[in-house]
Image (tube, rainbow, N blue to C red):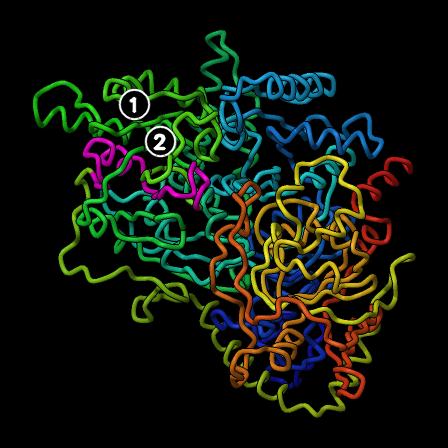
Amino acid sequence: MVSLRPNGPATAALRASNSLLIRVRWLPQQRGFRQNSKRRQEVFQSQLEDPNAAAILSSLKTSPKVPQTLTEKIVQQYAVGLTKDKFVKSGDYVTIAPHHCMTHDNSWPVALKFMQIGATRLSSPKQIVMTLDHDVQNKSEKNLTKYRQIEEFATKQGVDFYPAGRGIGHQIMVEEGYAWPGTMVVASDSHTNMYGGIGCLGTPVVRTDAASIWATGRTWWQIPPVAKVTFTGTLPRGVTGKDVIVALCGLFDKDDVLNHAIEFVGSEETMRSLPIDSRLTIANMTTEWGALTGLFPMDSVLQGWLRAKATMSALDSSEGRSGNERFSHPRLDQLFESQLSADKRAQYAKYLHLDLNTLSPYVSGPNSVKVATPLDVLAGQDIKINKAYLVSCTNSRASDLAAAAKVFKDEAEKSGDAIPKIAEGVQFYIAAASLPEQQIAEDEGDWQTLIDAGAITLPAGCGPCIGLGLGTGLLEPGEVGISATNRNFKGRMGSTDAKAYLASPEVVAASALTGKISGPGWYEKPEGWTSVVRGEGDGIKEEDRMITADEAFQKIIDQLDGIIESAEGELSSSEQTTSEASAGSTEVYPGFPERVEGEIVFCDADNINTDGIYPGKYTYQDNVPVEKMAEVCMENYDPKFSSMAKAGDILVSGFNFGCGSSREQAATAILAKKIPLVIAGSFGNIFSRNSINNALMGLEVPKLIQRLRETFSEEPHKEADSHVTEPVGNKEEQQSLDSPPPAAPTPREKQLSRRTGWTLVWDVKKSQIEVREGPNGKTWTEKVGELPPNVQEIIAKGGLEKWVQKEIAAA
């Protein structure tokens, strides 16, 4: 990152031990636009909220003394092929060799991809873990055949394999020690974020990525901007980790952390009030909050949990049972001696805070994680329920089952009678996150308590959480359900005409007992309580802030930076041009086009989801001809698109293009239409991955969307804001790898698609686009993200699968 700064004795002295300090100032929910030759936005940087946050832009020449976040430090360890002294940071595209990669029921589709690219042996069998957990209740011959094929493949390749009924893959990854603090672990499932609860950087990948890892041990990743979420206070009695994340999703509901990595921090006292199981729940549902990771620190709470696991493993071994070699005290000694933490002066894209003292039990819904309501409000509305669920990787560990059982035990103690039964007309389903967790609950008597209360047991697996189970326990039309799971999108757990709420295990149990949404009465509102304290910043009052000499010194530097940055704004345009020229041109990988040009076809809508791009009815049809894919491209968004768009056109759309499910055909259908380039205000993260993996080029240019809307919108003209902003509409489904069909998009204008007559040229070397607004219109240019060579290489070789084929051939 090139920066022009005045030099002087005072500045030099202050910077003697700080070679370069980069400041990030966050403007909430603003995507500002301004011409600035020194600040370049990365390709597919959906995560970026504001180009003023220059520190998160990708740079291939990072100062080795730039402080790093915990996220960046972990990625640093798993990035391969870095140049000497290259320190990674947010925005960088990196090639990663993750510690582990987990696949579940989708292991067979991944295996088919693996074999199609010509691979025969896994690059590193011990890097891969396979679990069967999604459709475990399905005993059809077709599903059993698929499960058998996966197991046979795993056995042949020497992969660690866990059969159906053993537990949910994410829980297995944690309890078996595959997800390990300070490592980077990926899985082909959207709730991989859960591993962050134990200080492991977990993030989802798509099937092509998984096949690439199987074959080469590697895939690519763009490091997201990192948000720092500071917890203050401690959790009151009766408030759980589930309440924390449900409240965060509802209180910060304007895509505040969309496509970000999150790092949770707090004082030692605060973090002690969040046990590991609560952290796993919070990290798990950062997916629903819109984030790509949710990382907790490696602190004394985690150390205690790990020591207990190692002690139990040693005890098992000493008594002749099978211990777990991944949990050993010598390994923990080594971990704790060199455990990672964020640098004190690490800079973040956003700073948010939540005071746990002010939190009460919360309920999410109906049918949206962005609607969060205090329990006492809903409890007063007499909302009757038909079904209750204590299942999923989010909240069905032994501690959750114990909390639910306690509701019934307390009621029995009050009445001096036997365990009470659930309310008449209510069905209460339970399934442990894994067999070991179920065994603990059985040993403690909690499992039997729930059965005595009338609970219906299901095998350890995903089941109703994802709408599977051959109809067993799914919501019927008109029914109301309350669940301890992570998603309540309409139709996910059954009928689209049902209502689904999310809550903690004890609230789910209390609701099953009373027949309506209610709590166990464990929470007492503090005297003088007014509202939940949350917002931007770290939440520490200035009068309570104690700063060290280093922090005071840093404050002086910050003030000087403000003066310096003001001076930068007054630099002449000629100096800016000189700076731009000195930056040099982008290196173009052999075979990657130096220029891409075409006429703009404008689809003026935000949140065009993958179902709008490629209809779901074709998604699971094998061998759909390319011509048919081209014909149905954008069909569910605009049936007229197919006849309007031509080969060589450039497709331009609004914000969050490609949200929804992970279907790769959303990218390949556009390519089938012979459209080489898509430009949007921002992209859904999974669509971004699928585009690069399938050699579809894309750019984010918010200014172009603004100009097109100013020119072509049929709505009453409004004065353009000084900043181009992200939409804040219904985007709950965008991070889902297994979401239900998203709702149809709401267009901004009557004409859904139009040929604009505008032409666009992308000069790859200059990292610049030139737009001509019609034959006689004005022409203007705009800097765009520099596409790094490693991503160019994947696209130039025809996508990730072909890149893997060439890697295999070269080996």
Query: What residue is rendered at 78% in x and 78% in y?
Result: 770
Residue nearer the viewer, 360 or 99: 360
Query: Percent position (x, y) of residue 789?
Result: 82, 57
Q: Residue at x 39, y 17 (%)?
A: 439
Q: Say which mark, if any, is on residue 455.
A: 1
**Image quarter (top left, top right, bottom left or bottom right) of the N terminus:** bottom right
Q: Residue 246: horizontal and vertical position, in percent?
A: 36, 49
What is the number of the mark on residue 73? none
Q: Which residues are magenta?
A: 490-519
Query: Which residue sits at x=77%, y=32%?
Result: 114
Q: Are marks 2 and 1 in contact (CB under 8 Å)?
A: yes
For marks 2 and 1 on the same chain, the one whose residue lies earlier in the sequence = 2
Displayed quadrant of residue 534: bottom left
Looking at the rendered structure, the secondary structure element under dot 2 is: strand
The kind of residue tagged 1 is: Ala
Element type at mark 1: loop
Q: Nearer the viewer, residue 749 or 208?
A: 749
Question: Badge 2 is on which residue?
Answer: 390
